Image (cartoon, rainbow, N blue to C red):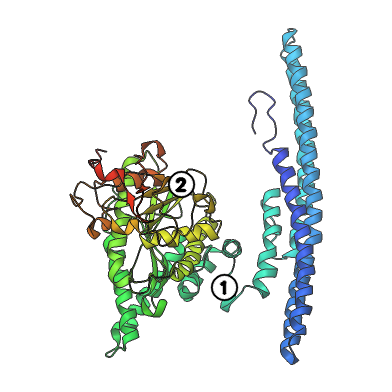
């Protein structure tokens, strides 16, 4: 911190420098533990193999253990040097305080101006001594860094740079070398997102570009990378695959499905990029976060973000319902995401929103929806994709998961089985969220919202947990009626109106996504009809006249 006046403090904060020393000590301990674990793993794994495989495994893990152990001592010594600099800063600040106090005392006594020169010389001597200490510490840290990475000496002289260099060497030298690396040193699928992010940050810009250009299929779906990097890689795979498939004269059924998936994704991306942002009037950022056109026996898996996931203040995932496929459902889902993003930008003040059309699981049809197996599998994929967004960013955005119809079951199970960091859950037209009460979901209290039209028959099917429109479920029910609803009976058409423009439902979903909770219109809860079989509900919303939001 900088202090005004004739004798300002040095710029470095001793508390922050001390924290760097503590992190170096912890990193030193982690390196030592990693070396021990790698050695033990080498003995255990290699002992279960025979011949050259056993020898190769033992040698590789032994080398990784050596590298990890080699880092422990330099990190410990770096911690001591950085701590010494922190103590020197504290001493310098105390000395400056004494100079300042003496100077102010003499001024109050009417001292002549020439006395100020003596105080400035004392102040300069304090700074010179501190700078000498800093130079000595920098030389020591530079030597330690070169002992680990001879070609990566420290030139900036910043303790933070040295600490970052040494601490980040562990995943680069130990983990990347033998445990998570695939071809060309690229982490394999399933590697922890945090490790992937560290690996990526250690590459130079040229190295990053070369990997995206030469191995896009290996990084496009790699969790932990920036969304824009994944999008560029995935679009490269998309365009290459389109070129190959369209050049063939004859395609079998599987290849035709893959081609149709690719065409649908390409078409939706190109169409979405023609739109303009409401405030800046620049073109909308569109990112292809997930692209697996052959997944799920050809139904495919994709996730398209409308908005910049790397920088948006709010990120929302839209999870679709029954019978959703890339070929048939992606246009509608991307359209909903685009509309949600536009409305969020319109009502929020100075914040940005990215809405992700997540066609990322094998949604069942009406013929095989009896169980929740698809939701269980999809829940794991959803949780991984949501957490990947957080892992790739320094500042975690406000996250919302919106489950529509059977997608609410998938979303509920994901939030039940995983700690995702999601801030808000929105369930619309839900046949159940896989739980009996919101307390089973890893969501802050009061941040599970449910919207169900009184005319939507699917929302009365509590097949996958308690009907979330009931008060005992514990969610906040919001108004979701539509002025075009069927006037007197239930209608499947009303199951498809939750994201229509100028509807109560869309307005309330937007308010939740941007955190305008006070603007959410609450609705009365449903309740069981006395003396009728379980599942027969009375809905007070059926008698309320729907409104058209004015904002």
Q: Secondary structure at mark 1?
A: loop
Q: Residue furthest top?
A: 110
- Mark 1 / mark 2, whichever is N-terminal: 1
| 348 or 502: nearer the viewer | 502
Q: Quadrant of residue 188?
A: bottom right
Residue 339 image position (x, y, % from top left) = 29, 52
Would residue 376 appear left or right of 248 to someone viewing this image?
Answer: right
Q: Check residue 144 in the rendering and tell me which mark sits there, or answer none.
A: none
Q: How far is disc 1 from disc 2 in space, using C-alphas?
A: 49 Å
Residue 409 image position (x, y, % from top left) = 43, 61
Would residue 308 appear left or right of 454 to someone viewing this image?
Answer: right
Question: In the rendered image, which residue does mark 1 sit on?
Answer: 186
Q: Residue at x 56, y 56 (%)?
A: 419
Question: In the rendered image, which residue does mark 2 sit on?
Answer: 472
Residue 538 image position (x, y, % from top left) = 32, 48
Q: Residue at x 33, y 56 (%)?
A: 459
13 is higher (above) or lower (below) than 27: above
519 is higher (above) or lower (below) than 32: above
Q: Secondary structure at mark 2?
A: helix
Quarter of the picture containing the N terminus is: top right
Q: Quadrant of residue 234?
A: bottom left
Q: Foreground mark, 1 or 2?
A: 2
Residue 49 image position (x, y, % from top left) = 73, 87
């Amino acid at each position: 911190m900088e202090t005004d006046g004739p004798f300002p403090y040095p710029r470095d904060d001793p508390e922050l420098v001390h924290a760097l020393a503590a992190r170096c000590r912890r990193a030193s301990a982690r390196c030592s533990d990693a070396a021990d674990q790698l050695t033990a793993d080498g003995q255990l794994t290699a002992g279960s193999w025979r011949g050259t495989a056993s020898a190769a495994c033992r040698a590789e893990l032994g080398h990784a253990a050596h590298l990890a152990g080699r880092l422990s001592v330099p990190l410990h010594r770096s911690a001591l040097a950085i701590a010494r600099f922190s103590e020197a800063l504290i001493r310098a600040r105390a000395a400056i305080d004494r100079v300042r106090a003496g100077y102010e005392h003499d001024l109050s006594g009417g001292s002549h101006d020439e006395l100020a020169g003596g105080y400035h010389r004392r102040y300069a001597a304090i700074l010179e001594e501190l700078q000498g200490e800093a130079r000595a510490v920098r030389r020591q840290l530079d030597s330690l860094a070169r002992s680990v990475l001879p070609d990566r000496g420290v030139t900036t002289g910043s303790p933070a740079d040295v600490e970052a260099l040494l601490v980040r060497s562990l995943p680069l030298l130990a983990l990347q070398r033998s445990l998570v690396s695939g071809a060309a040193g690229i982490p394999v699928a399933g590697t922890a997102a945090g490790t992937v992010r560290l690996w990526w940050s250690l590459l130079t810009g040229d190295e990053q570009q070369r990997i995206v250009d030469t191995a896009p299929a290996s990084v496009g779906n790699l969790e932990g990378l920036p969304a824009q990097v994944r999008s560029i890689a995935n679009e490269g795979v998309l365009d290459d695959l389109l070129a190959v498939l369209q050049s063939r004269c004859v395609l079998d059924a599987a290849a035709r499905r893959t081609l149709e998936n690719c065409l649908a994704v390409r078409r939706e991306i190109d169409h979405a990029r023609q739109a303009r942002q409401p405030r800046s009037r620049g073109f909308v950022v569109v990112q292809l976060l997930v692209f697996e056109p052959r997944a799920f026996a050809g139904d495919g898996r994709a996730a398209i973000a409308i908005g910049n996931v790397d920088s948006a203040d709010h990120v929302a995932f839209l999870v679709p319902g029954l019978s959703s496929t890339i070929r048939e459902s992606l246009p509608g889902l991307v359209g909903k995401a685009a509309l949600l993003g536009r409305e969020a930008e319109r009502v929020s003040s100075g914040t940005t929103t990215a809405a992700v059309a997540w066609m990322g699981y094998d949604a069942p049809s009406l013929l095989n929806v009896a169980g929740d197996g698809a939701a269980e599998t999809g829940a794991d994929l959803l949780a991984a994709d949501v957490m990947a967004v957080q892992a790739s960013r320094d500042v975690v955005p406000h996250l919302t998961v919106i489950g529509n119809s059977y997608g609410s079951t998938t979303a509920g199970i994901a939030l039940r089985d995983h700690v995702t960091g999601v801030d808000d859950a929105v369930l619309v037209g839900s046949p159940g969220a896989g739980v009996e009460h919101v307390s089973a979901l890893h969501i802050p209290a009061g941040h599970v919202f449910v919207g169900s039209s009184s005319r939507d028959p699917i929302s009365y099917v509590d097949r996958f947990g308690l009907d979330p429109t009931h008060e005992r479920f514990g969610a906040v029910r919001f108004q979701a009626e539509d002025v075009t609803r069927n006037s007197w009976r239930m209608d499947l058409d009303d199951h498809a109106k939750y994201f229509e423009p100028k509807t109560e439902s869309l307005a309330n979903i937007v308010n939740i996504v941007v955190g305008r909770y006070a603007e959410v219109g609450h609705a009365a809860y449903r309740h069981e009809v006395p003396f009728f079989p379980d599942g027969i509900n009375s809905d007070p919303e059926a008698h309320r006249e729907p409104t058209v939001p004015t904002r």
